[in-house]
Image: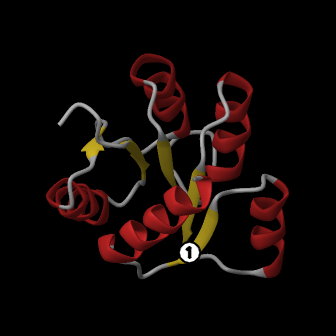
Amino acid sequence: MSDALKILIVEDEFLFAYDMKTQLSRLGYSLCELVASGEKAIEVVKNENPDLVLMDMNLSGQMNGVDTAREINTIRQIPIIFMTGHADTDTMEQIRRLKPLNIVTKPITARTIHNLITAWQQAAF
C-alpha cells in the first residue's frame, strides 16, 4: 500500500520494537527498519523519509531520544510521538520543549499509537 503512513520506530528494546512493528503493519502502516540508536535513526530519516517517528527516550549509542529528536528536526520537521518509561519531571520537560505530537508512558500498545495517529490525522483536516 503505497499511500500508507510510513513510521520509523526508534527503540532499544528489540522485542518491544518488533512487536510494535508487527502490530502496526497489521493495522496498515508502512514501517521503516527498526533502529535502536539515535545515530541510526538520523540515517534512516535522511534515506527513507518517514512521515512519523515513534521515539524511545533511552537508546543505544551516544544520543538519547531528546538529542535524536533535536537532530531530526534540523533535517526535517517530522511529527514525533515519544514513548517513555521514564516519566520524571525533568525528562518530561525536556520532551515537551521539543513540542512532540504526543508523549505516552510505557507500557503502550499499537492500538494506542493507532488511536493517536488517527486523532492527529483527523485534526490535520
Q: Residue at x 78, y 52 (%)?
A: 98
Residue 91 vs residue 42: left or right? right
Q: x, y percentage for residue 25?
A: 19, 53
**Number of numbered labels in the structure image:** 1
Q: Residue at x 28, y 63 (%)?
A: 20
Q: x, y percentage for residue 17?
A: 31, 58
Q: x, y percentage for residue 94?
A: 81, 61
Quadrant of res 95: bottom right
Q: Secondary structure at mark 1?
A: strand
Q: Residue at x 21, y 53 (%)?
A: 28
Check disc 1: other Cα within 10 Å, few if <14, some if 14-19, many if 20+.
Answer: some
- Asked whether 125 or 51 is in front, the reply is 125
Q: x, y percentage for residue 113?
A: 41, 68
Quadrant for the N terminus in the image: top left
**Which scheme is used to colour this image of the protein?**
secondary structure
Q: Amino acid at mark 1?
A: Val
Vertical order, 15 against 4 (above or below)? below
Vertical order, 96 against 36 (above or below)? below
Residue 27 vs residue 121: left or right? left
Residue at the top extreme, as displayed? 47
Q: Name the residue that disc number 1 marks.
A: 104
Q: Residue at x 76, y 69 (%)?
A: 91
- Asked whether 39 or 29 is in front, the reply is 29
Vertical order, 18 against 6 (above or below)? below
Residue 71 vs residue 108: left or right? right
